[in-house]
Amino acid sequence: MELPLISSIQRVQVYETKARYYIIGSNSTETAFRVLKIDRQEPKDLVIQDDKHVYNKVDIRKLLEMIASGNVKAGKQKHTGEGFMKYVSAYGIVGFVRFLEGYYMVLVTKRSIAAVIGGHVTYKIEDTVMQYIPNMPADKYMHPDEPRYVKMFQSVDLSSNFYFSYSYDLTHTLQYNMAPSVDPKFGEPKQTDKHKSNVYGVKVAPERNYVWNKYLIEPYQAHVHSDWILHIIYGFIAQSNMYIYGKSVYITLLARRSNQFAGPRFMKRGANSQGAVANEVETEQIVQDMCVTQLHKGRISSYVQMRGSIPLYWSQDISKMVPKPAITVDKRDPYFHTAGLHFNRLLYRYGAPVILLNLVKRREKRRHEGLLCDEYKDCKAYLNQFLPPDKQLIYIGFDMAHYTKKHTNDVFDRLAGISRFCVKQTGFFLQLPQLRSGFWEQPEYDGVKGNKTESGCRQTGAVRTNCVDCIDRTNTAQFAVGKCALGYQLCALGVLPVPDLDFDTDCVTMLEELYENMGNTLALQYGGSLLVHRIEGYRKIAPWKAHSVDIFQTLSRYYSNAFSDLEKQQAMNVFLGVFVAHDNELNIWDLPTDFYLHNPDAAGLKMHRKSYTMWCDPAIFNHLPLPFEEACKPKHSLVQVLSREDEAVNVLFENYKPYTLTDIKRLAQDMEKVIRNYRHRIYRNPSPFERRASFDGKDSRFAALSIGGSSSHHHHHSGKFMLQSASQELGRTISVKDSTASMSSNTSKSSEDSSSSASSVEGDIVTSSSSDDEESHFKHRVAKVSHTEPNVYDLDLAQYEEDEFTQELYKRYVDIGAADQSKLSEMKVPHLMASPKIEPLGEYPGDIYGVEEPEVSKRSMDVYIRYVQCGLGGASEPSAANKEIYRNYIRQLYM
């Protein structure tokens, strides 16, 4: 059995002397320790030593005492604590960096939990510290450009959207992480001792294109144990907990940004000579049934898609201050060499087919984006000549901006069809403990492809979405694809009977918010502002103020692109090691352009060019439709452990941390829950798949309730709202005047006017009646409601007209408060004057300190007696019916 290795270094203590830094790393329980020694006497070199030895708590304490005593004996300091002192506590080492002087050490000093994936905890970096290593005299000469490089490096905010994990590889997809390793170098592990277990901890090499501290770990990676290395990604991670009748289903959205050809909007467009594209982001949507936490034994699914600029040589001239700079194709590539390199890498990582969803405008008064659209189609046509039909690139063009201009067009209707086609072509990753026979022959999965396995399915291929910026339109299209994929994922996990999800449900509202947050984060990283065109704008349900917000975001994006993008690009080049500073050479701010930094062949360096026809590597082609990266997954290290409960592989121990105290404040800040944050308080049905009406002006039925009034109207509106909310459980809407009568007796004339206006907005559902016959008025009111109220919840209201029990229940509700005859007479509601008085269960006697006990029914007493007996003697034997229910539940759970 192969399980992922958990890093043994999750706490770091840094001690300093004048000669060295001592970095003490320990596991989470502080039972195993490792030591790094960094020499501070070297002015410009990094001298780091790792003895590769594991210490226990007693040994590490003796070692620190020996270092401290040795430092005192050397006569450097008196024994005052100044010679050997603790510098900082941290959670890991980001890396080491050097500019023109000595090396700096970057440490993670604060973290927060971002998500939990199958028991593996992922963290977001909240704060870091950067410390200069050499211990040089204060009067030593310092290069004058050193502070500027330091400031430029620190302008890349590591506390903003950088993530890491001690046990889960965030640079790879879930499907890759759960795939078995097939590295022939290690071979099959053999049982060497009958007393040893057959459990191995495995660590795989990360995907370097998504490791953002790749340049920072290069100076020491080959000299230290692998547990000292943290692989940090840049992008977005968020997680929501969807409660489905008490069952927790985690939905995680993870976006990892590529470090290749990275930069802000107008600084990086198209592709470079190595096939890397601008704004390349891989998005993964993970759904897990949390009844079982562990990945290999649980029920989990994922779907991967990506975004990226069109892989051609194109750019926009920003020298002129215009909102939309002209698009120019900088270099003609008749054999589309760069695009071939890019799509070869996609086939390597995702398999086939790769679906190209192009949202660039085609109908324009002045030709602008259409240039890229024509070139992109020619590129697809040329490259597909050399692939068989079942492995070719699939091109889908959709002019989303033009289509949404017509008010009668629904963008999401078109996107729903495109999304369903894409999901069926690529399939989705699914892992179940046991797959029942005939699972994929069900009509719900008709046409769904992918690589079917004994335990589920593997995704083959991916959807590559792009517009010009890959920000606004792309995010909306990815949400549509993610919504369709979520339906299939929930259906495969046994949550839904069919793979369909409606808008205005708690589940889709939660997913929309996840994608909105991801889109805003990625837009800030690449474009300098939040999303300009949001999902609700394309749904045409955005409030009136959304247009002004869009204008503000457009201005913010324009300002960022015009005045701060150059500094961002320079800082990113320094952080990623694209530019390395040297003495007696040009500084980065003196370079006229960074084109030669990102295109090595343009600088005169020889690069291997592939054939004009065989743009796909033979090894990759032979494994299609499976991704070559997954089919030939290598092992980075293989360690035999004592058992599955060993701390090095025990994910449950890592996740639940039984050795720590529970933090109540942290529990209060738990992940978002559908019931608490998305379901409105009037709804009693807890299902997140139930259609809800809108309360933010999107539904005309509640428009009057969503418009705020003066403070004098507040109680009137809230009372009306509460009564309507309760009555809607029976498909009713009660009279405005009745609700006013039951809530207050001193309603002002202005309140009555607002009441009548609110009633007119709702369609004048109920009118007052002066009939003396209360029963006939009640039946008339029910019939009026049943035939005039819009059927929002798909309820058949006619079935309640002849139901005496329901009518009586509704009548009792309306008559609450009718006992106060004086107030009713003042409010002029004569049809409630004759209502029967509601008697309480108990009455207060003359003695105010005593009360008559209410009569308790025999059924209630039996329930109480059984409860007390259960507490005294334990649980009783369940009935035969309950046993049968439990057997059916277990049978369905494992089928």
Image (spheres, grey):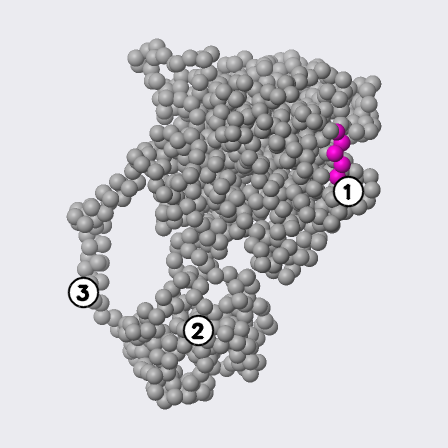
> Residue 696: percent from the left, percent from the top?
55, 61
Q: What numbered label is drawn on residue 325?
A: 1
Q: Nearer the viewer, residue 626 or 890?
A: 626
Q: Report the amino acid beneath label 3.
A: Lys
Seen at 66% across and 16% down, the residue is 608
Which residue is the site of mark 3? 858
Residue labelled with disc 2? 788
Q: Quadrant of residue 201?
A: top left
In the image, residue 723 lies in the stretch drawn in magenta: no
From the image, state whether disc 3 or disc 2 is nearer to you: 2
Left or right side of 692 for 559: right
> Is 200 rendered above or below residue 192?
below
The residue carrying pointer 1 sits among few (fewer than 14), some (14 to 19) or many (20 or more) residues within 10 Å by Cα, namely some
**Residue 889 in sight in this render:** yes
Frontmost residue, 123 versus 110? 123
The picture places residue 427, in percent across and down from the top left corner, at 45, 36
Q: Is residue 367 above or below residue 461?
A: below
Question: Does the CB distance between marks 3 and 2 fall below 8 Å?
Answer: no
Report, in whole angstroms, how far the alpha carbon at label 3 lies from the one at label 1. Answer: 81 Å
Of 413 and 212, the residue lying toward us? 413
Amino acid type at image mark 1: Pro
Of residue 348 and residue 45, the one placed in the foreground of this image is: 348
Q: CA distance from mark 2 to mark 1?
A: 54 Å
